[in-house]
Structures are given as structure tokens and as C-alpha cells.
Amino acid sequence: MQLVFVAGVGMTRIGRRSEPLPELMAEASRLALAEAGIDTPEAIVVATMNPEEFLGDGNFASNVATHMGFADVPALRIETATSSGAAAFYAGFAQVTAGLRRTVLVVGGEKMTHLTTPRVSEIIGRSIDPYERTYGATMPALAGLVTRALMTRHGVGAREIAQVAVKNHANATRNPLAHFQQAVTLDEVLSSRMVADPLRLMHCCPISDGAAAVVLSARPSPVRVAGVGQGTDTLAVRHRRELTSFAATRTAAREAYAMAGIGPERVDVAEIHDAFAPFELISLEDLGLVPPGKAGRATLDGDTALDGRLPVNPSGGLKARGHPLAATGLAQIAECVWQLTGRARDRQVADVHCALAHSIGGLATNNWVTILARA
Amino acid sequence: METIAASHCPRCGLVVAPPAAYCPHHPVSMAPITLPGVGEVVSFTTLHTPPAGFRSPLHIAIVELEGGGRFVCHGAEVQGLKIGATVAIEAVDNVYYFSHLGAMERARLFWRRAGHAGDRVNAIARSLAKRVWKSRAVNTDA
């Protein structure tokens, strides 16, 4: 198989944005292409979760390609709910590693702050099993069920969960592109409004606009794609034996580690899908980065802080960098590339050789693990 | 007691409720079965700003039915409810609700579940401690 390199990355500021989505995606793409020194890629992969409902627009690969002046470049769209960006990265990686294309632009984005929160929640909730939705299940509701089981059956404490949000907000104060630029305290998180008991408002990621892009190339550059893995699970959460561990993450991690030929002990920094704070704790264990049952303690002890043994979500994570759905998987990869190439500025982790990005689609029905390494 | 329509995978034994045409894990047709409307709470939550069409607060639970299969339902209240508690499930206008079981219902369930006379003594010995603990948990918190 052809080795695949990350030739360039780009990301917009995440948050409330007035520009149309195709323009946000063009902004991220232009940054990535400029860094790669490429005028026109051989192919484009576009990720958006639901522009049909958020914007009323479809045929989005052609929409974005045409907007950027790439109407003549073959473009396709990929969707796996909230992990669409990571899935699009895989589709681009597959084209290059198979020798079908030499350079592929992968761009993901979402725009939703122009809608009310209930409407956004409803549209994101389309990714939930239809029967469970008839009982009022939303993403926060299912995350609330997971969180209560995590606390009751596994003894994970409220402070351990809240510390994830505190840490990720602290990291985001060092990221000028992050949605939230201010720190929060443990007390603020613990006293924030109850959303889906025991899940609180400040355990949840915000609604964000934004885009991120990656240029993949067969030509050697400092960062190599070491491994990509996908894991899937039942659409219905009720059909699973476990609520507090995601099989889709475990499968994706196993595949990615096998392709990279490494184990979790080699990971120097990780971007983890903390759409809800407890998911960071679950994922740390599912990814094998922390021994079972130890993620809460490790987080409280500062092991996953910027200056800890294994910094997690130096970008601020979904919680504080923001979560523009299909942009997120690529925003995580952009952060990994910046960390690997010493360009993460105030949030740079020392001596990063291997970085891992983990993306959850739906309520962990379609998850991805991407491992990047210094070439 | 309420019964709940479900289905069973002939290959892996997975039970899903409500019934599905195919097993989520195997490309085989599922066989229809019926389960009693009683089970153990796997987890529950309360939504304070539920989606359109639902009233706040909205209680949602996942219940592991006797005979297997996990079921999503609503509840009228969750005061004192604990993960692991036994609840009854009833349909009101085709919407399923869980409710705490009183002492009499629990006793009746226990004797029904204990099965044939020969098994009964063993069953009592096995589950007495669990039952006492559970009923105390429910009573003290109610």
C-alpha cells in the first residue's frame, strides 16, 4: 500500500459564524491547500452531517466544490453522523493508499447556530434509533442514561466527570480558534443546570459553526497516517449489553493500532470525542490509554492535563473548542498535526511522536480512531 | 400483567423489543416471542427540556425484561428509583410506562418465577437475601 502523508491542515475559528457553510469550508480548504503547496487537488471528499435540514441544501459535495472553484475536480460526500469528518478522512486516505489519487482534499463543516437549540437537538437526534426517539430520546437523554450507569455501576464520581470539562476549558483558553476562550471551575460545572439527570449543561459540548480541512498526499511530508480504524454498533442503544463502554471505539482502536503496528502506550497526545464529559472517561478506557476503572482518578490527578503524562484534548476538545459536527473529526486531526509538527503554540505538548484522534458517530454507532506519526 | 411483544434471534439468542424483522447482528429473520412486562432498571434519566411533543420533566428508562431484551419506556416518577430495582411495565394508549412494584406484586412475581415445587426451596435460598436487600432499598428511599 502507498504510504499516505498529511501535506496540510486548516481550520476556521469555531463558534457562531455569519458566513455560509460553503464559504467556511472554502476558508479551511484554502488554508490546508496553501500549507500543502497545492493549487488544485486530484479529488475532494466532503463531510457534512445534515445540510439538508440545517441549511435546506443537498448535493453538498458539488455545492462546496463549485463554490471553491473546483467544479471540475471529482468530489463526493461522506456521512456517519457526528463522526463524518473522521469517516471522510478515511475515504481520502483509502484513495491515496490504493494509488487511485495522489492528492485528496478532505473538508468537513457544519453550520447550525442560526437555528434554535431545540431544533438543532431535533436534527442531531435524527441519528438516534427511531423507536427510541418516539420515547423522547435525544443525544443528551441517551448520554444521561450512560452517565447514570457509569456513576452507579462503576462508581465514577461527579467531580471526576466535571474535571474533564474544567481541563478542556483550560486548554481552550490557549487555542485562539476555540469556541470558548474562558476557563470554568469545578463548582461552576457541578452547579450548572441539569439537562438529563445526572448530566448537566456544562458536561455538554456547545452548538458551533465551523470547518476543518486536511490535504492527504502520496508525497512525503513530516506527518504520516499510521493507522485508521472503524468500529460500529447497533443503532439502538437498548440492544447493547453495555452502556458504559463503547464497542465501536474498542473495535476502531484495535484496527487502528494493528494498522499502525503500535499499542496505546506509544500515544503521546490524544484528541478524544468529549461531546459529553463522561464520554472522555469512557473513551480513555476503551482506547486502552488508561487501565479499566482508572480514567476518573487519572483525570482528577492531572494525568490528562496539558502538562500530564498523557495530555488529552489539548485543543479544548468538543467541550470547549466546539463541535461543528462533521468538522470535528478533521479538527481533531488538525490539532494532532499541529502537535506533531511543533506548531501548537501555547498548548504545545513536548516531544510528540505519535498522536491519536477518536471520533464518535451517533450514540457510538460508528466510531473512528486515526493514528498519526512523525514520518 | 402486561405482556410485551418481542423477537428472538435463532442464531445468537438476542432478544429485542419491540420485535424486529432481522437480528441487528445477523442477517436472519427473528422469531416473534412475548415477554412479561416486568424487569430490572438498567438506567434512567430525567429530561428537563424534552423535545417537542413531550412534557417536562420527562422520565426515560432502559429496563432489562425478564426473559431478556432491553426495553425503553417512560415513568410517571423516579423518586427513590435505583438502578437494579424491579419495575412493572404497563401500556397506556400504546405508550409503555414503568412503575415501582409494591411488596405484594414482588411476592407474587417471586412465587411465579420460583417455578416448580422442586425448585422452589433452592430458589428461595438463592434469592431471599437479594429480595430483602432490594425491598429495603426501595422502601427506605420511597
Image: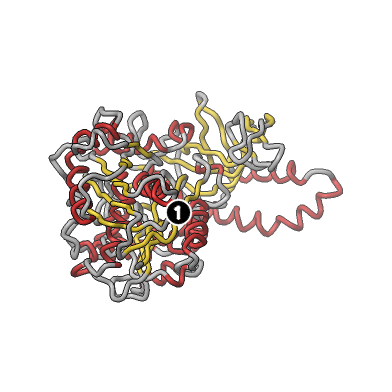
Pinpoint residue A188: horizontal percent, then vertical percent.
Answer: 24, 60
Using residue B50 as the reference point, say whether residue A33 is left or right of it: left
Location of residue A164 (image quadrant): bottom left
Q: Nearer the viewer, residue A248 or A355?
A: A355
Using residue B15 as the reference point, say whether residue A173 is left or right of it: left
In this picture, is A103 found above or below A63?
below
Which residue is depicted at the point 26% across and 49% down? A213
* Image quadrant occupied by the C terminus of chain A: bottom left
Q: Amino acid at mark 1?
A: Arg
Pinpoint residue A127: horizontal percent, then vertical percent.
Answer: 41, 37
Using residue A135 as the reference point, say whether residue B50 is left or right of it: left
Chain ID, mark 1: A
Outermost residue on the right side: it is B118
Outermost residue on the left side: it is A18
Location of residue A320 (image quadrant): bottom left
In this picture, is A258 found above or below A121?
below
Q: Nearer the viewer, residue B95 or A103?
A: A103
Which residue is depicted at the point 67% across and 36% down? B8
Classed neighbour count for the residue bearing mark 1: other residues with Cα under 10 Å, few (<14), some (14–19), many (≥20): many
Which residue is depicted at the point 26% across and 61% down? A315
Residue bearing the label numbered 1: A148
Q: Is residue A143 visible?
A: no
What is the secondary structure assignment of the residue under circle 1?
helix
Q: Is residue B87 visible?
A: yes
The colour style of the image is secondary structure
